[in-house]
Image (cartoon, rainbow, N blue to C red):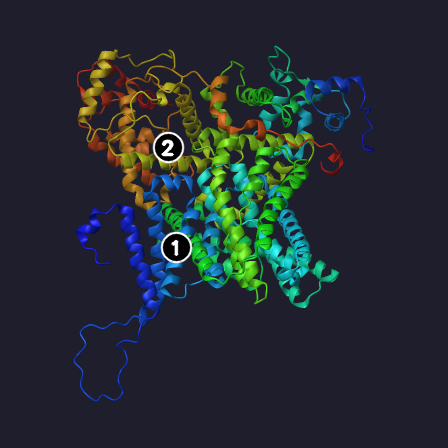
């Protein structure tokens, strides 16, 4: 370890990462046998000791120190992988992390220490919830609800089939094999089957995240892994209880079915209650924005813990909480809180996932093992076989009820994506000490390793080979949003015409119920009335505006489409404005640009910002700076447009009118009252208009008190255009209209 | 199928089944519904659609009703304009636009079906049948969509429609000079726009094979 600093610097980065790793691990293990150091106060002081300048007191900080060390190790590993590009493309991260865990575990064992095992409290209470919350909060609702029937069938029936098939066949094999295995009875086998049969959300997330498969398949496998928790919980408890007793009666079976419904529905109920509470709380947080994210996290965690208290399905509770809370919380919290929530959830779930895989590796090395070739091999083979049979059989039945059928390719991916993971291991760990426990654990670990390594590594090339549809990368555009809504209404209408109450009908009813009752209670202020299309549009505008601000002076390239290209040109409606020649136009434009402060290039961007439809008022008090810049850019753009777009006499948005009439002081009061009268927007704020009024003066070098904007724009540039003077004679209302061309 | 009392082997049904792809049972059920809506008459008029309670709270109600009476949707070669009343045949043809594509189709046939559904949507937007969706028409679409959602005014709808139009223009034309004018969304542009939309799997409803219409009304 005696490396000098300059030597370290010359090593390639990954080596230094490993060196650091070794340092940490050594420190961690050395800390285990921390001697009792100079903390003891000798009761009988026989002689006076010198005053201790430096003391070593490790016990005091031991637990947090070790925890931090482990987390740091996990994160350094993650860093390290991305330094090695080739490997991370072939091998999924989960595999690499398990390997690291194995190495670390081996190292610790070599030193002679006892490695920490993945014990169930740590796993179920601390490591699992962040991952599930992250998954549940960002669950894509639309594909999930569209496929919920399929997902439920796979989750419930599929898992039941897997458990019983595996348990039964294992029992048969054990009886046939004899020897060591003959003592394994049916109930133990069924217990084992129920542990191994559940598809694991952590593993699925870890692997599927990297292959970017299309939304339908992703939600099918992932949804199944989430919803099978209820089945697993019930089966596990059922067989655990009764493998001690030895027999299962019919009554027990019936009670188990009832228990299943209680567990799943109860979990959902608990989650929904906490979700509603969380949404309701977020309604009042407008003055304490800083703690908003905490409410989301705490309510969700409480939902999980409360469900665990009653042995309900904690995972389903967590999912229900996240899903229920999300639309209302997002409408209520500030943009910064939203970002915070998103990043914290991603961060925690990332750390948890990494730790889980590392600990899996460490526990493998640490734990006691009992290897039995037959048992393990048969388990692995059976897992695959039962999964394939289950998926094919169920798909055959499901396809009769689906509009969009599942193809063979889809079925293959669903079957192949059924990965087992840490949940199975922890459940096995939880088993009471049983003479077969170590055997089971070994088999479970082998299955987990097999699925994560073999299936995880090969699924990517298989996806490429089979040309499975990938996730579309582009962000949702406003046109798609419009048409999604349009299609929803259209299909609901057609269902109405047909006369049967289908999927769309009920969705529509739910939406209406949501809008009339729920939103009013759970969303603060004006935003409760905002329809989805408008919120989408606002979010998009916001994103554009932020991009604009961030990119600063590097505006978009000229030549892209802008508003004037799509505005219908008014032919000749008694035009009172003379047409300017192109050369003149160029001149004017150039002069304008030179005169404006901080000239930006002509921005061709999405939006024609309707300032009075600005819902960001309540959302972003901090964005006033950004808005100011946005407005100024907007003004510059409009001014250069005025030279090419003829007047359109039809509608004129009052805000723009205000802005440019500000030059004429006599108009001001009349204008602002006119603005207020005309403002029909929801979040119209006269304050906005006034602030706009105040802004425009600095941009106008020359002010004239004549008819309209256009003239003043030009005159600001060159005071020689006499043609327009004729306009001053017009009555003011007319002048207002004429002077306000602009893309409308 | 005891609930059907219309003869499944009427020659008319055979012709319709071939034309639209529905099964005999489905045609029978839809015929029952047709009779229910038209009060046992032979033709449907626009007023008959008012008897459907679910349709009343639908924001794009008028456009849906218009689609039924639009000749372009009748799969005739040169249908233009609207009619005042439709018979069962036309009713069925319009409904057949919403049939899910069979899983056995190959890619070419799927493409044909996709174009059909896209055409139906396009016709719904292009009310003056000039082959393009102009800005005004698109604005109208957005306004209708937002009409039930509260009095948020035309300005926001306009803003949204304008932004959407800009996007279409950007996707389709890429680059335009400042004085060029984008006429409107043609069918090719519309196709390009909704390429990722997977309309062939989304624009479907489930047509019953068993008669459940008596349960709900």
Front of the two marks 1 and 2: 1
Chain letter belonging to callout 2: A
Asked if residue A520 can be seen in this view, the reply is: no
| Residue lying at 45% horizontally and 18% vertically, measured from the top left | B184
Q: Are marks 1 and 2 in contact (CB under 8 Å)?
A: no
Query: Could you say which is closer to the camera, residue A139 or residue A287?
Result: A139
The numbered mark at residue A302 is none
| Residue lying at 55% horizontally and 41% vertically, measured from the top left | A416
| Residue ranking furthest to the front | A179
Chain letter belonging to callout 1: A
Above-or-below relation of A453 to A371: above
Secondary element under disc 2, as helix, strand or loop, is loop
Q: What is the tally of numbered marks visible in this picture? A: 2
Quadrant in which the C terminus of chain A is drawn:
top left
Query: Where in the figure is residue A700, as x and y percent of width and height?
Result: 20, 28
| Label 1 crowd (10 A; few <14 / some 14-19 / many >=20) | some
Query: Could you say which is closer to the camera, residue B129 or residue B28?
Result: B28
Secondary element under disc 1, as helix, strand or loop, is helix
Query: Where in the figure is residue A580, as x and y percent of width and height?
Result: 26, 12
Query: Could you say which is closer to the camera, residue A191 or residue A685?
Result: A191
Which quadrant of the structure image shows residue B99?
Answer: top right
Query: Could you say which is closer to the camera, residue B95 or residue A204?
Result: A204
The residue identified by callout 1 is A103
The numbered mark at residue A610 is 2
Asked if residue A420 can be seen in this view, the reply is: yes
Structural distance between the alpha carbons of marks 1 and 2: 60 Å
């Amino acid at each position: 370890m005696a490396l000098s600093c300059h030597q370290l610097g010359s090593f390639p980065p990954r080596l230094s990462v490993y060196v650091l790793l070794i340092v940490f691990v050594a420190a961690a293990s050395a800390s285990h046998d921390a001697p009792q150091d100079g903390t003891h106060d000798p009761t009988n002081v026989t002689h006076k000791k010198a005053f201790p300048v430096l003391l070593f007191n490790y016990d005091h900080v031991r637990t947090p120190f070790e925890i931090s060390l482990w987390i740091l190790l996990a994160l350094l590993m993650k860093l390290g992988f991305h330094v090695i590009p080739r490997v991370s493309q072939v091998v999924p991260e989960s595999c690499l992390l398990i390997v690291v865990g194995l190495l670390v575990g081996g190292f610790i064992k070599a030193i002679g220490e006892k490695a920490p095992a993945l014990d169930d409290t740590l796993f179920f209470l601390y490591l699992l919830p962040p991952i599930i919350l992250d998954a549940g909060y960002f669950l894509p609702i639309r594909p999930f609800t569209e496929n919920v029937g399929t997902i439920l069938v796979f989750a419930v029936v599929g898992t039941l089939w897997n458990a019983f098939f595996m348990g039964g066949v294992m029992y048969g094999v054990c009886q046939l094999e004899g020897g060591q295995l003959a003592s394994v009875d049916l109930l133990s086998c069924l217990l084992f089957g129920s542990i191994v049969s559940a598809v694991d959300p952590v593993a699925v997330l870890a692997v599927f995240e990297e292959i970017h498969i299309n939304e339908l398949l992703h939600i099918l496998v992932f949804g199944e892994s989430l919803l099978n928790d209820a089945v697993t919980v019930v089966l596990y408890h059922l067989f655990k209880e009764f493998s001690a007793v030895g027999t299962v009666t019919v009554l027990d079976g019936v009670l188990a079915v009832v228990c299943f419904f209680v567990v799943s529905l109860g979990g959902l109920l608990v989650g929904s209650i906490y979700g509603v509470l969380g949404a309701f709380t977020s309604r009042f947080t407008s003055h304490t924005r800083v703690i908003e994210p905490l409410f989301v996290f705490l309510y969700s965690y409480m939902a999980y813990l409360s469900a665990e208290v009653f042995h309900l399905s904690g995972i389903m509770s967590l999912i229900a909480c996240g899903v229920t809370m999300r639309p209302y919380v997002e409408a209520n919290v500030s943009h910064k809180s939203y970002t915070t929530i998103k990043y914290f959830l991603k961060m925690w779930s990332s750390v948890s996932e990494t730790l889980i895989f590392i600990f899996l590796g460490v526990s493998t090395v640490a734990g006691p093992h009992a290897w039995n070739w037959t048992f393990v091999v048969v388990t692995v083979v059976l897992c695959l076989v039962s999964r394939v049979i289950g998926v094919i059989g169920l798909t055959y039945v499901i396809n009769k009820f689906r509009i969009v059928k599942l193809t063979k390719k889809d079925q293959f991916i669903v079957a192949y994506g059924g990965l087992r993971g840490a949940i199975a291991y922890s459940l096995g760990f939880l088993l009471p000490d049983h003479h077969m426990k170590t055997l089971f654990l070994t088999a479970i670990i082998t299955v987990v390793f097999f699925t994560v390594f073999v299936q995880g590594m090969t699924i990517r090339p298989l996806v490429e080979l089979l040309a499975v549809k990938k996730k579309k990368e582009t962000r949702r555009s406003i046109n798609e949003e419009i048409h999604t809504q349009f299609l929803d209404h259209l299909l609901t209408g057609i269902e109405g015409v047909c006369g049967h109450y289908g999927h769309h009908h009920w969705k529509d009813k739910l939406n209406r119920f949501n809008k009339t009752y729920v939103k009013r209670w759970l969303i603060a202020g004006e935003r409760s009335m905002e329809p989805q299309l408008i919120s989408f549009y606002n979010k998009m505008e916001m994103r554009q505006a932020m991009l604009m601000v961030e990119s600063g002076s590097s505006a978009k390239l000229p030549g892209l489409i802008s508003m004037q290209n799509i505005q219908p040109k008014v032919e000749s409606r008694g035009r009172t404005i003379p047409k300017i020649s192109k050369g003149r136009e160029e001149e004017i434009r150039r002069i304008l640009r030179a005169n404006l402060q901080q000239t930006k290039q002509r921005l061709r961007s999405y939006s024609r910002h309707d300032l009075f439809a600005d819902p960001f008022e309540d959302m972003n008090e901090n964005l006033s700076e950004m808005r100011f810049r946005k407005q100024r850019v907007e003004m510059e753009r409009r001014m250069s447009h005025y030279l090419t777009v003829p007047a359109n006499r039809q509608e004129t948005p009052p805000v723009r009118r205000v802005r440019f009439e500000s030059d004429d002081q006599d108009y001001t009061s009349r204008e602002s009252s006119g603005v207020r009268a005309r403002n029909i927007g929801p979040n119209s704020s006269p304050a906005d208009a006034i602030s706009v009024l105040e802004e425009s003066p600095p941009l106008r070098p020359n002010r004239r008190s004549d008819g309209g904007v256009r003239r003043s724009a030009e005159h600001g540039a060159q005071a020689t255009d006499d043609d327009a003077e004729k306009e001053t004679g017009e009555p003011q209302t007319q002048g207002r209209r004429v002077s306000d061309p602009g893309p409308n | 199928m005891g609930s059907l009392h219309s003869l499944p082997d009427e020659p008319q049904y055979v012709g319709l089944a071939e034309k639209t792809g529905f099964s005999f049972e489905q045609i029978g059920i839809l015929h029952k519904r047709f009779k229910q809506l038209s009060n046992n008459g032979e033709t449907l008029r626009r007023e008959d659609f008012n008897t459907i309670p679910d349709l009343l709270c639908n924001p794009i109600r008028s456009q849906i009703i218009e689609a039924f009476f639009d000749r372009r949707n009748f799969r005739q070669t040169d249908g233009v304009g609207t009619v005042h009343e439709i018979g069962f045949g036309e009713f069925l043809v319009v409904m057949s636009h919403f049939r899910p594509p069979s899983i056995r189709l190959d890619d070419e046939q799927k493409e044909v079906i996709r174009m059909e559904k896209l055409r139906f949507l396009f016709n719904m937007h292009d009310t003056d049948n000039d082959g393009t969706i102009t800005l005004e028409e698109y604005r109208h679409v957005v306004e209708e969509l937002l009409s039930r959602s509260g009095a948020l005014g035309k300005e926001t709808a306009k803003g949204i429609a304008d932004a959407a139009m800009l996007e279409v223009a950007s996707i389709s034309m890429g680059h335009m000079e400042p004085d060029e004018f984008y006429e409107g969304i043609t069918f090719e542009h519309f196709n390009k726009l909704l390429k990722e939309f997977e309309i062939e799997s989304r624009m479907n409803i489930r047509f019953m094979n068993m008669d459940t219409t008596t349960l709900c009304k």
